[in-house]
Amino acid sequence: MKFTKGDQVRTSRADPPHHTRVPLYARGHVGTVVELQGSWPLPDDRSRGLPAQPQPVYTVRFAARDLFGAGDHTVTLSLWQDYLEPL
């Protein structure tokens, strides 16, 4: 486990030519780890027929204003460890 509750993380900015579970609107944005959900195979690898080793999946909270330019609410996403980098 690379991250713990409260850690600030940035999502990957990559725009791969294959399936990814990082929504376009969240790429390159900073959020806060809320919890560890467990470990699951990376869908990107599975969609390409590659062996997928389980890795930690985190609930990450973002301010809607940061993602969309407006809003007083938050958005939470389930994101695999490979999609995140520490700040």
Image (tube, rainbow, N blue to C red):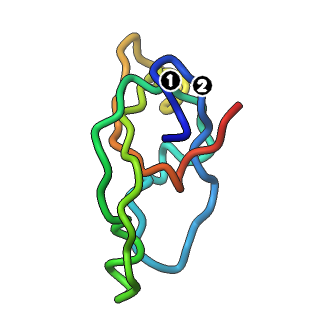
Q: Nearer the viewer, residue 44 or 36?
A: 36
Question: Which residue is tagged 2?
Answer: 8
Q: Is disc 1 surrounded by few (<14), some (14 to 19) or many (20+) residues within 10 Å?
A: many
Q: Is residue 40 above or below residue 32?
A: below
Helix, strand or loop at mark 1:
strand
Measured in 3D between alpha carbons, the distance from the residue under mark 2 to the one under mark 1, in whole angstroms, is 5 Å
Question: Which residue is tagged 1?
Answer: 32
The kind of residue on which mark 1 rests is Thr
Q: Is residue 24 above or below residue 29?
A: below
Of mark 2 and mark 1, the one earlier in the sequence is 2
**Marks 2 & 1, CB-CB < 8 Å contact:** yes
Q: Is residue 26 left or right of residue 13?
A: left
Residue at horizontal 33%, vertical 42%?
A: 78
Figure quadrant of residue 37: top left
Judged from this view, the residue extending furthest toward the top is 72
Q: Residue 5's x, y, as percent? A: 45, 21
- The C terminus sits in image quarter: top right
Residue at horizontal 41%, vertical 17%?
A: 71
Residue at horizontal 59%, vertical 33%?
A: 9
